[in-house]
Amino acid sequence: MMMFEGLLMLLRKGSRGIAASPAGLSPASSYERSTLAAVLGALQVLYLAGMPGHWWSDPERMAAPRVAEYVQELFKNTPVEVSVVSNLKALEKEYPCLAAVNRCASGVPRHQARVIKLQYCGDGAIKNTLMLVGKGITYDTGGADIKAGGIMAGMHRDKCGAAAVAGFFQVLVTLKPKHLKVFGAMAMVRNSVGSDCYVADELVVSRAGRRVRVGNTDAEGRMVMVDLLCEMKEKAINEKCPHLFTIATLTGHAIRAVGTNYSIIMDNGPAHHLGNAHQWQKASEGLGDMFEVSTIRREDYEFHHGKSEYEEILQSNNLPSSGTPRGHQTPAAFLIMASGLDKHGVDSDKPLPYSHIDIAGSSGPFPGVPTGAPILAMASLYILRPQ
């Protein structure tokens, strides 16, 4: 709520209300219009993730099929192209890690997974390509590693990463920035518990061909995103100045590390060489969508190396992230390894910049209204500032 209250003040006062504006912003009237558009996009998240007085916060009424219908209707007759993957066989073939999480929910038609793909292409020669993957867990029971002791309440909000992707596309529709191409993928899955749920010790071969040993079914967020990240990697090789992102309410460790109100961003090698994380941090300050910067270290990759001859990669340990050292950094290493992005580091022929954004702390309180993080930071960096 703090971010929105600040934005409403900015809208009333114009650019004079800003202590430290992002560099290169246009005069006050233009700035107000741009900020208002960014707010409209952020409000889109409220409808997807939960808003008092509406049904969107009900995990039954806003399960994956309903989200897909909503997004298709939202972007009808706009510059955003929308496609949906719903066929179970297609999900199993193209996104095996996501399909593992979906296996239990797939037995209930209204809970079945959807992969929602979005694309925007601005006018003029493309200068930058953003490739966004959002975690969209419509409800997280924890699966077989169930969330016990009263900590399951609020898990309908585990879709804020995917909602932020949709919200950013709403900003694109409103502002129609030129020279920018954006791909989005919303991984809408319910992590259910039951006789057909995936369990720890299972071996799953990712889209990139990596053998993954499941360590904890409550680490489902990385599972539903990793194959979509791999697909984005495959596309990125042929795109102009691509940058890949995963956005997720991923770890309790993020909250323990930096507290609430702050997102965490961490770069792979190529993104670090571009100074990406610090650019996000600087751009976010003018609109109050605040970021802290973390670093992916060698130990994070070692943590996920397979522990036996049967698996190449360990998905997770069997502890909560909040009780695991470097609990918000190691999932980024897993996503890089299991998607095959480790073959596109700084020493490769085709380095691909990738950044992981954990919004567990910044997505908003429960009970309460979601903040829309990190839509405003994205709008500030890639749309409101000249490229």
Image (spheres, rainbow, N blue to C red):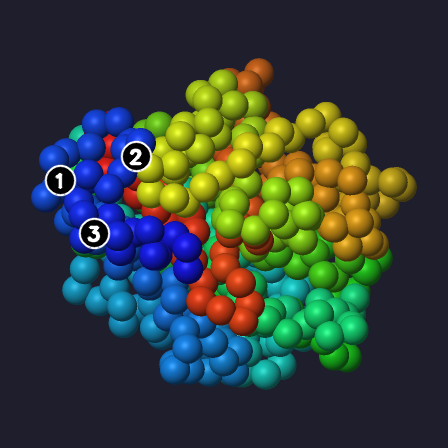
Residue 325 image label: none
Q: Nearer the viewer, mark 2 or mark 1?
A: 2
Which amino acid, by three-letter code, is at mark 3?
Leu
Q: Distance between the residues labelled 2 and 3?
A: 14 Å
Query: Tag 3, which secondary structure?
Result: helix
Q: In which quarter of the image is residue 118?
A: bottom left
Q: What amino acid is labelled 1 in the image?
A: Ala
Say whether disc 2 or disc 1 marks the residue closer to the N-terminus: 2
Do residues under tags 2 and 3 come within 8 Å of each other at their CB atoms?
no
Q: What residue is shown with label 2?
A: 19
Task: Give the camera-side residue of 334 and 10.
Answer: 10
> Mark 3 — residue?
11
Image coordinates for residue 31, horizontal then vertical, percent: 17, 42
Counting residues from the start of the chain, the first of labels 2 and 3 encountered is 3
Q: Residue at 78% across / 40% down in the picture?
A: 325
Percent x, y of residue 17: 24, 42
* Mark 1 crowd level (few <14, some 14–19, many ≥20, 10 Å Cα): some
Query: Is residue 202 or residue 18 the one in the foreground?
Result: 18
Q: Which type of secondary structure does the marked residue at label 2 adopt?
A: loop
Q: Name the residue under label 1.
A: 28
Q: Which residue is at the front of the view, 251 or 368? A: 368
Q: Which quadrant is home to the N terminus? A: bottom left
The answer to whether residue 211 is visible is no
Quadrant showing the C terminus: top left
Q: Viewer-nearest of labels 2 and 3?
A: 2
Is 124 located above or below residue 196 in the figure?
A: above
Extreme residue toward the right, this view:
308
Residue at (48%, 72%) from the top-left corner?
Answer: 64
